Image: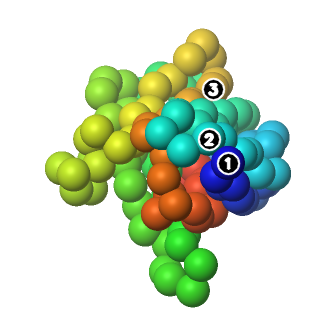
Amino acid sequence: MMLLPLLALAAAWSHGQAQVLLKQSQASISRRQTTTARIECIVEGVSSFQSVNIHWYRQIPSKAPERILYIGSGQANYDHDSYRTKYSSLKKGANVCTFSVNNINSNDEATYYCAYW
């Protein structure tokens, strides 16, 4: 089983009068190799959630964080074409953004987190 540590992000940013809060409820998840892991990011304080960009990052131990993709009102935009089959993201409802890591293997062990900016 692969362990994918997650950063439980609970940071707030001030945008004028409003504050935005991003929450990932899982501290870590484990999945068998070749399966898919899904991570949820709950976004609070954004009135137009479906149109804002939510970014997904990964940080491999002892390396700098790396953005994988961002998703706005349409499909995900990937930082590298090679990520299209490995990762995916979609928005659900009024405030949930999901991120999937497909066909998990040992190279996927990292900290994954969502961001809004």
Dot 3: few (<14), some (14–19), or many (≥20) neighbours within 10 Å? some
Image quarter of residue 12: bottom right
Image quarter of residue 97: top right
Q: Amino acid at mark 2?
A: Arg
Say whether residue 95 is left or right of residue 89: right
> Quick check: marks 2 and 3 in contact, CB under 8 Å?
no
Along the viewing direction, whichever of 33 and 9 lies nearer the viewer: 33
Mark 2 or 3, closer to the camera:
2
Mark 3 or 1, closer to the camera:
1
Secondary structure under the numbered disc 1 in the rendered image: loop
Sequence order check: which comes first, mark 2 or mark 3?
Answer: 2
Q: Residue shown at 59%/78% (left/top)?
A: 61
Q: List the single residue furthest toward the bottom.
A: 62
Residue 65: % across, % down: 50, 72
* Mark seen at residue 46: none
Along the viewing direction, whichever of 11 and 47 lies nearer the viewer: 11
Say whether residue 7 is left or right of residue 102: right
Q: Residue shown at 50%/23% (left/top)?
A: 91
Q: CA distance from mark 3 to mark 1?
A: 26 Å
- Above/below status of 1 relative to 34: below
Q: List the single residue furthest toward the top.
A: 93
Q: Amino acid at mark 3?
A: Val
Say whether residue 94 is left or right of residue 86: right
Residue 51: % across, % down: 42, 27
Along the viewing direction, whichever of 99 and 61 lies nearer the viewer: 61
Dot 1: few (<14), some (14–19), or many (≥20) neighbours within 10 Å? few
* Mark seen at residue 32: 2
Query: Label 3: which residue?
Result: 96
Residue 45: % across, % down: 70, 35
Q: Amino acid at mark 1?
A: Met
Query: Label 1: which residue?
Result: 1
> Quick check: marks 3 and 1 in contact, CB under 8 Å?
no
